[in-house]
């Protein structure tokens, strides 16, 4: 245990001595490792450890947060005392009785990456590099990165909860650059999960390396996408980033509880096409965004956000729940102990529909097929977004035609939800890092192939 029960009880009492009605201690010890290969050579091996404690106090909807990397007893007492002083006048210390709870671990890692030799880790990178380089003579550079995280957390609060969790994650990424001498195009292949190196027995480094090279070469020979309003089919996996960014953030209590969401006050109302069911599931075994418990110690759950177009739930943390008079949903997360937790997504996706995938494409007389999405930006208050299409193709007379590049999808979250008029059956997810008020956290995005009846496409 990162800290002893008696010490935790005393610290909680000190923190609550100024009248807070809730106190929480979040202790963390996390190791992060990164190995980077460029041009066939391992360039960097970085390992770092992060240790510290965050103490949060709540009084109604008032919040105070303090953190420290000084985990000596005097350092912890000083942090708790400073948090108490910021809340109000110091008085009596309440007695806190803690009861340890052990939650089931459904995300086991068989080969923890940090415990595997650098030689074995480097071999995975070399395998993907070789496959990417051999894909085409036009591949001029390949970079591979192997990330591993071993996060150990402890949570104790004035409700009597004392619990711990270990979270192991691994991610392998290859970025390839194709060149014809006059210009360059890039492609990415990546896969990660809450697991160890056993991931790459099935999703091999060779597959990821080749996929990054294939995308780069395809886009090198692509023309520019035309601009205008058109029908768009968005492929599965990372295509789900549009729902995550343009709609998902607007369903977090971070935005909803303060009136800064396009979906405030719309529970029970239709906000999407009836074909759309959207889910956030922190319980998916070994998924990149999964946890046994959230960073407030609440068990994660499978939460239906939208069912057949009807808004059913928000993502609610403890503080947001106080503002909204709703129970927490196990979605409170933070990058590390420096951050106060807040409501965040985990594995968020549009569920499988009933439309045949081939029919979705065949139904399009003219439009864009977004085979792979890139990054973008969104305003959660208005839902307005702008996303790059990393790999795109024109659709003509119901068939996928020539590749195009430079496409962007521009719109508003509430509008795109209503315009999704086909939902396929090939649900898949992809990994990303999501930034918000409580820092950068691992999240999955996903969907099957979908069709949007009309959306603005930026291009040339």
Image: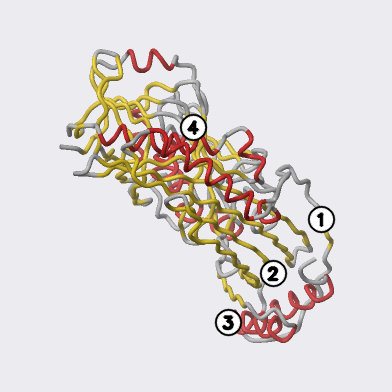
Position above or below: 41 against 106: below
**Label 4 to label 2: alpha-carbon separation:** 35 Å
Q: Earlier in the sequence, mark 3 or mark 1?
A: 3
Residue labelled with disc 3: 86
Residue 405 at x, y percent in the picture: 25, 36
Residue labelled with disc 2: 25
Residue labelled with disc 1: 101
**Label 3 to label 1: alpha-carbon separation:** 30 Å
**Label 4 to label 3: alpha-carbon separation:** 43 Å
Residue at (53% x, 36% y) in the render: 312
Left or right: 217 in relation to 43: left
Q: What is the secondary structure assignment of the residue under circle 1?
A: loop
Decide: marks 1, 2 in contact (CB < 8 A)?
no
Residue 80 at x, y percent in the picture: 67, 80
Q: Earlier in the sequence, mark 1 or mark 4?
A: 1
Find residue 350 and name its label. 4
Residue nearer the viewer, 80 or 51:
51
Find residue 145 and name its label. none
Query: Is residue 415 something that shows in the picture?
Result: no
Residue at (30% x, 15% y) in the render: 399
Residue nearer the viewer, 403 or 100:
403
Q: What is the secondary structure assignment of the residue under circle 3?
A: helix
Q: Earlier in the sequence, mark 4 or mark 2?
A: 2
**Label 1 to label 2: alpha-carbon separation:** 15 Å
- How many numbered marks, from 0 up? 4
Residue 394 at x, y percent in the picture: 25, 24
- The residue carrying pointer 4 sits among few (fewer than 14), some (14 to 19) or many (20 or more) residues within 10 Å by Cα, namely many
């Amino acid at each position: 245990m990162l800290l002893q029960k008696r010490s935790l009880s005393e610290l909680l009492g000190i923190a609550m001595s100024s009248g807070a009605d809730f106190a929480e201690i979040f202790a963390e010890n996390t190791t992060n490792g990164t190995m980077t290969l460029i041009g066939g050579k391992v360039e960097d091996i970085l390992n770092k450890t992060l240790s510290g404690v965050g103490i949060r106090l709540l009084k109604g909807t008032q919040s105070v947060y303090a953190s420290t990397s000084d985990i000596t007893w005097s350092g912890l007492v000083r942090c708790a005392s400073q948090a108490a002083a910021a809340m109000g006048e110091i008085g009596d210390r309440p007695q806190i009785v803690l009861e340890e709870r052990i939650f089931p671990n459904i995300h086991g890692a068989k080969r923890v990456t940090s415990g595997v030799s650098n030689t074995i880790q480097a071999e995975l990178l070399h395998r993907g590099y070789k496959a990417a380089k051999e894909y085409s003579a036009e591949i001029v550079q390949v970079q591979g990165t192997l990330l591993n995280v071993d996060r150990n957390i402890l949570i104790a609060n004035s409700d009597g909860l004392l619990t711990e969790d270990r979270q192991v994650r691994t991610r392998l990424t290859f970025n390839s650059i194709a060149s014809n001498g006059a210009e360059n195009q890039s492609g990415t292949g990546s896969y990660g999960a809450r697991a160890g190196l056993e991931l790459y027995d099935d999703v091999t480094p060779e597959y990821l390396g080749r996929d990054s090279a294939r995308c780069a070469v395809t886009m090198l020979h692509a023309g520019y996408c035309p601009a205008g309003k058109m029908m768009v089919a968005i492929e599965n996996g990372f295509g789900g980033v549009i729902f995550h960014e343009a709609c998902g953030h607007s369903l977090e209590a971070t935005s909803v509880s303060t009136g800064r969401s396009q979906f405030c006050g719309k529970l029970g109302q239709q906000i999407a096409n009836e074909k759309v069911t959207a889910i956030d599931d922190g319980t998916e075994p070994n998924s990149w965004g999964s946890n046994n418990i959230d960073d407030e110690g609440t068990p994660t759950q499978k939460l239906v956000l939208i069912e057949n177009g009807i808004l059913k739930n928000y993502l609610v943390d403890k503080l947001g729940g106080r503002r909204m008079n709703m129970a927490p949903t196990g979605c409170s997360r933070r990058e590390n102990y420096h951050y106060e937790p807040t409501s965040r997504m985990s594995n968020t996706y549009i569920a499988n529909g009933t439309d045949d995938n081939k029919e979705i494409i065949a139904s399009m007389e003219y439009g864009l097929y977004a085979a792979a999405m890139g990054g973008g930006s969104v305003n959660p208050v208005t839902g307005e977004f702008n996303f790059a299409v990393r790999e795109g193709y024109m659709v003509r007379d119901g068939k996928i035609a020539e590749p195009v590049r430079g496409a962007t999808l521009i719109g508003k979250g509430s509008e795109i939800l209503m315009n999704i008029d086909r939902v396929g059956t090939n649900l898949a997810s992809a990994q990303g890092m999501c930034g918000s008020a409580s820092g950068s956290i691992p999240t999955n995005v996903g969907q099957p192939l979908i069709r949007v009846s009309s959306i603005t496409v930026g291009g040339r």
